[in-house]
Image (cartoon, helix red, strand yellow):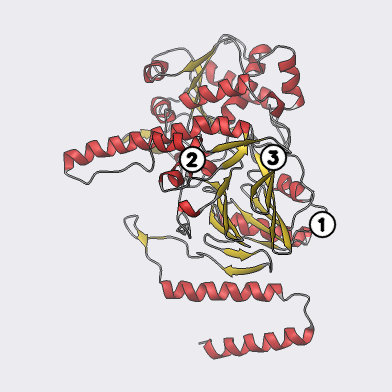
């Protein structure tokens, strides 16, 4: 029974785990890496066609985005997930395929002019459609057989419509292990969505740590805080540009904006227009409007029961075509522009930034996490100028952050989630966090809760029957040469480094053994150190 970590290990995006048991190969999440690459990802140790089954925690591309690539390369098994996740993936994976095809077309136009080689898209719309045909919908709380001696259950984790933690019961021979994959753990008291639901028992837990080193701080009253930003920006005659993830965050912002409109909190600009400028966000907003009200929290469900659409209001305009998008920037009236992507790495938001970053009267408001290496992160950290479409743009607008708005639990929320386990898991594997954050949060689990915690690297493998580490994984950060290239690591030194990490894991596992055995082991390690120390 072997668990391999193949993504989001000491990195924030690209979640992917492979569980192999009794000749059956099961994958949990298959996400696309976004932002800066810190560690070289290790390849899937088997052909995609040899994977028998996939489970998906939620629809975000950093968890689902490589499923069409798996299908393109031979995967034919089922993809088990919740109904809401399946519906949102229908939007997001098609959009991702469109981006892949568009980029290939753009590159190939350049290559044709320069005589370069033809560029193939990562995957196509046909691959995305083939992937979506493999989805099998599972209800929250339903236990399903997903493989020989493998049962799964999806539990609402409050991060996104349809998001789930996945409980797996796996039997090999006479031994059974329960493994819980947290998925992305939701923040509490979010608009629209329920709080994360607890899980009480597990042998092993794989959990995210995006905010494992920090708190969201005192929870602001979002509606008046957002209203104050609107008032200030509109009084200056500018636009409020909100880079927003098309699925989840955009709908939360609409929920707040509906309340601001309803309560007339922006004086002198009561009829301001709100543009949602992202075809994917428009589609997702329709899903939130019409479906899955059972995923909502009590307040949102009450509104629905009263016949009130919680994310619709006067002055809301949904922009579908590129012509609609272009027209927004010719509208002279102060307005709100909600556009994807949330980290400003692609999509229509980059055009709106080009038209507004240089304007002192405008405001760019960030309402979500910005990964290192993204344009959004650069702006939040105070960049004075940025490049967009080959043009240098001076940053003169206000750049603000609406603190506390996050779909992820902060460090205390993560701690509260893991405290729900009534008996201590054998190991908590900390993933899906920035390099140092994974170690910080694993150390906190050990120090404060007395848990056995590890922060595995990409390519790490663990035997879940014995609890031992089989392969440490890639601990070598990608070094940058002058000119931005990757510096090749010494494979022999890496082998030595892996051996050192393996030795450390063995030492940690010996805690509690007889003193005589520990003393003999210590003498052997000390002799080895004496032999090789310069």
The percent coordinates of residue 364 (x first, y second) are 50, 29
Q: Earlier in the sequence, mark 2 or mark 3?
A: 3
Label 3 secondary element: loop
Residue to which mark 3 is pinned: 157
Q: CA gap, disc 1 to disc 2?
A: 45 Å
Q: Give x and y (percent) for residue 291.
A: 63, 22
Say what secondary structure mark 1 lies in: loop
How crowded is the residue under tag 2: few (<14 C-alpha within 10 Å), some, or many (20+)?
A: few
205 relative position to 456: left or right? right
Label 2 sits on a secondary structure element that is loop
Q: Position of residue 58 (x, y in %)?
A: 60, 39
Identify residue for label 2.
382
Residue at left offset 73%, top offset 87%: 519
Asked if residue 224 lies left or right of residue 276, the reply is right
Can you give x and y, in whole percent of width and height, for residue 505 in the image? 64, 72
Would residue 345 be visible to someone looking at this image? no
Local crowd size for mark 3, using a 10 Å CA cut-off: few (<14), some (14–19), many (≥20)? many
The residue under the point 52% across, 45% down is 77
* Residue receiving disc 1: 423
Residue that appears at 52% across and 87% down: 532
Vertically, is 466 above or below 282? below
């Amino acid at each position: 029974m072997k668990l391999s970590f193949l993504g989001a290990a000491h990195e924030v995006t690209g979640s992917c785990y492979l569980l192999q048991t009794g000749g059956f190969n099961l994958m949990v999440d298959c996400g696309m890496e976004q932002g800066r690459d810190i560690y070289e990802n290790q390849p899937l140790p088997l052909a995609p066609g040899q994977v028998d089954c996939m489970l998906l925690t939620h629809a975000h591309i950093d968890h689902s985005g490589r499923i069409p690539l798996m299908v393109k390369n031979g995967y034919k098994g089922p993809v088990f997930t919740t109904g809401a996740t399946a519906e949102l993936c229908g939007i997001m994976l098609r959009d991702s395929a469109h981006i892949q095809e568009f980029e290939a077309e753009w590159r190939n136009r350049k290559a044709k002019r320069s005589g370069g080689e033809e560029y193939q898209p990562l995957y196509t719309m046909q691959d995305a459609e083939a992937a979506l045909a493999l989805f099998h919908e599972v209800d929250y709380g339903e236990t399903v057989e997903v493989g020989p001696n493998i049962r799964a259950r999806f539990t609402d984790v409050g991060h996104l419509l349809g998001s789930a933690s996945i409980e797996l019961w796996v039997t090999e021979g006479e031994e059974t292990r329960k493994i819980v994959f947290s998925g992305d753990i939701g923040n509490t008291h979010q608009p629209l969505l329920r709080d994360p639901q607890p899980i009480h028992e597990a042998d092993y837990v794989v959990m995210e740590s995006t905010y494992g080193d920090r708190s969201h701080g005192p929870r602001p009253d979002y509606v008046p805080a957002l209203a104050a930003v609107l008032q200030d920006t509109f009084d200056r005659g500018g636009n409020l540009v909100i880079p927003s993830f098309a699925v989840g965050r955009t709908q939360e912002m609409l929920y707040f904006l509906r309340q601001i409109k309803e309560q007339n909190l922006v004086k002198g600009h009561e009829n301001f227009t709100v543009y949602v400028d992202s075809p994917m966000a428009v589609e997702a907003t329709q899903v939130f409007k019409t479906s899955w009200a059972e995923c909502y929290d009590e307040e949102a469900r009450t509104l629905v029961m009263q016949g009130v659409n919680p994310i619709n209001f006067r002055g809301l305009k949904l922009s579908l075509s590129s012509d609609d998008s272009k027209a927004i920037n010719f509208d002279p009236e102060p307005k709100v522009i909600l556009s994807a992507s949330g980290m400003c790495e692609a999509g229509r938001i980059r055009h709106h930034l080009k038209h507004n970053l240089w304007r002192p009267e405008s405001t760019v408001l960030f309402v979500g996490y910005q990964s290192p290496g993204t344009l959004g992160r650069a702006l939040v950290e105070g960049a004075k100028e940025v490049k967009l479409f080959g043009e240098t743009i001076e940053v003169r607008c206000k750049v603000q952050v609406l603190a506390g708005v996050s779909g992820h639990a902060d460090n205390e929320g993560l701690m509260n989630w893991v405290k729900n386990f009534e008996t201590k898991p054998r190991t908590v594997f900390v993933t899906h966090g920035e390099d140092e954050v994974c170690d910080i949060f694993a150390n906190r689990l050990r120090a404060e809760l007395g848990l056995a915690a590890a922060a595995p690297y990409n390519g790490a493998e663990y035997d879940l029957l014995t609890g031992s580490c089989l392969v440490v994984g890639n601990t070598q950060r990608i070094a940058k040469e002058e000119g931005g290239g990757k510096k090749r690591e010494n494979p022999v030194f890496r082998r030595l480094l892996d051996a050192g990490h393996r030795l450390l894991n063995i030492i940690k596992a010996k805690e509690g053994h007889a003193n005589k055995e520990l003393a003999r082991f210590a003498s052997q390690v000390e002799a080895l150190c004496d032999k090789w120390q310069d």
